[in-house]
Image: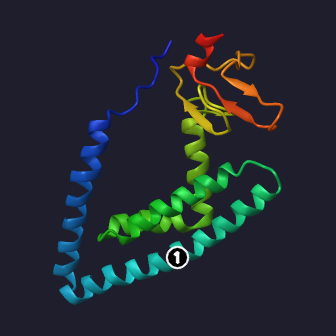
Amino acid sequence: MTPPKRPLPIGLILFSLFIVVPICELVILVWLTRVTSFPFTLGVILLSALAGATLVRLQGFAVIQKLRQKASQGAFPGDQILDGLMVLLAGGLMLTPGLLTDVVGFTMLIPASRRILREGLKRIFKGRVHVAVGGFPGGAGGGFGFRTENQPPRQENEDPSHLEDSESSGHFEKKTPFDRLKK
């Protein structure tokens, strides 16, 4: 029996993002400046930021249009939400000076590669994140919440005594845990 996969420690991930990646970016930019010239390197950085901002805007509008279309059909736009998050992340990467972050950002802006990334993310998080639609304990109204794989699933037939249907107004009234003690 193989041991379960352990996720990377968050400290290692943060160290990579905030220390290793900027050092690599700096080394590449210094190398490019030595091979070409400083004005050329600066032009590449500015051109990639401008091109990235334009592509982020175009792809963002396309994602929003698909999201609205999916929502108007009454379907949950999960793929479009992930696409929107990736376009937003790509925008941040494109505005960050550096060539590595630009390559990753451009990759996230191409719809075909974004689809591959989205399916990979769905495989990684499948079974780890569960979305529950409905009201929250202690409050009325809808919403959604997440639970991790360590939390037990919420039962469908749980007692919704914290919600009471108001016959006069036709909506749910907010009940607090203290209201149960009054009965």
User: For the point 52% across and 76% down, which residue is it?
Assistant: 55
Mark 1 — residue?
55
Q: Kindly tell me whether residue 29 is visible in this rendering.
A: yes
Q: Is residue 128 above or below residue 25?
A: above
Q: Position of residue 130 (x, y in %)?
A: 61, 31
In depth, the one of 159 and 128 nearer the eye is: 159
Which residue occupies 78% across, 30% down?
A: 166
**Is residue 66 shown above or below 14?**
below
Q: Quadrant of residue 149?
A: top right
Q: Position of residue 126 (x, y in %)?
A: 60, 34
Q: Is residue 97 above or below residue 169?
A: below
Q: Quick check: 14 above or below 108?
A: above
Please name the amino acid that badge 1 sits on.
Leu
Say which element carries label 1: helix
Where residue 115 sits: x, y (%)? 62, 56
Report the label total. 1
Q: Nearer the viewer, residue 62 or 68?
A: 68
Give the residue displayed 39% in from the left and 64% down from the top. Answer: 93
The residue located at (49%, 64%) in the rendering is 107
Tell me the quarter of the picture where residue 102 sits. Answer: bottom left
Q: Is residue 37 visible?
A: no
Q: Position of residue 44 (x, y in %)?
A: 32, 82
Residue most extreme to the bottom? 39
Asked whether, in this view, residue 23 is left or right of residue 53, the answer is left
* Quadrant where the image shows the C terminus: top right
Image-based side of 173 in relation to 45, left or right? right
